[in-house]
Image (cartoon, rainbow, N blue to C red):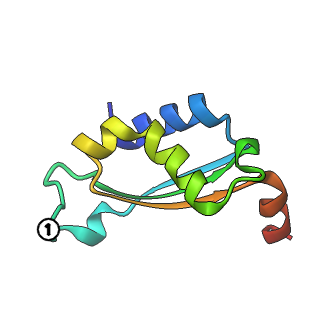
Amino acid sequence: MQVAQQIREIITARFTPAKLEIIDDSAKHAGHSGADPRGESHFSVLIVADCFDGQNRVNRQRMVYSALDDLLKNRVHALALKTMSPSEWANIAK
């Protein structure tokens, strides 16, 4: 299974996001330290979920890192996160 699909399945199961975007940035890092020759090692992820309401940015990221722990240890080298509550997303999407 592709890494992006694994990320999608884990985040969907754990957070039931209202919005989820996963971008594979690995091609931008080819040849750099930590780049996996198989690809799919660098990602940007946007998660909009109710569980982030009332949580600060650090706690939100800890929640995501905890959910993706095995992938981060074994396959994903870099993960850029944007985590928002639905109300925060609604204010930005206006």
Residue 92 relative to residue 31: left or right: right
Total labels drawn: 1
**Where does the image place residue 55, in percent across and percent down from the top left?**
70, 53
Give me the residue at 68% from left, 41% from top. 17
Tag 1: amino acid: Ser
SS of the residue at dot 1? loop
Query: Image quadrant for the N terminus?
Result: top left
**Where does the image place residue 4, in percent across and percent down from the top left?**
40, 43
Give me the residue at 66% from left, 60% from top. 56
Residue 5 relative to residue 61: left or right: left
Decide which of 60, 34 is in the foreground and name it: 60
Residue 68 relative to residue 50: left or right: left
Q: Residue 57's quadrant in the figure?
A: bottom right
Q: Residue 71's quadrant in the figure?
A: top left
- How crowded pointer 1 is (Cα within 10 Å; few <14, some 14-19, many 20+) is rated as few
Query: Image quadrant for the C terminus?
Result: bottom right
Give me the residue at 41% from left, 34% from top. 6
**Where does the image place residue 58, in percent across and percent down from the top left?**
56, 60
Q: Which residue is mark 1?
A: 33
Give me the residue at 51% from left, 60% from top. 81
**Where does the image place residue 60, in percent across and percent down from the top left?**
60, 52
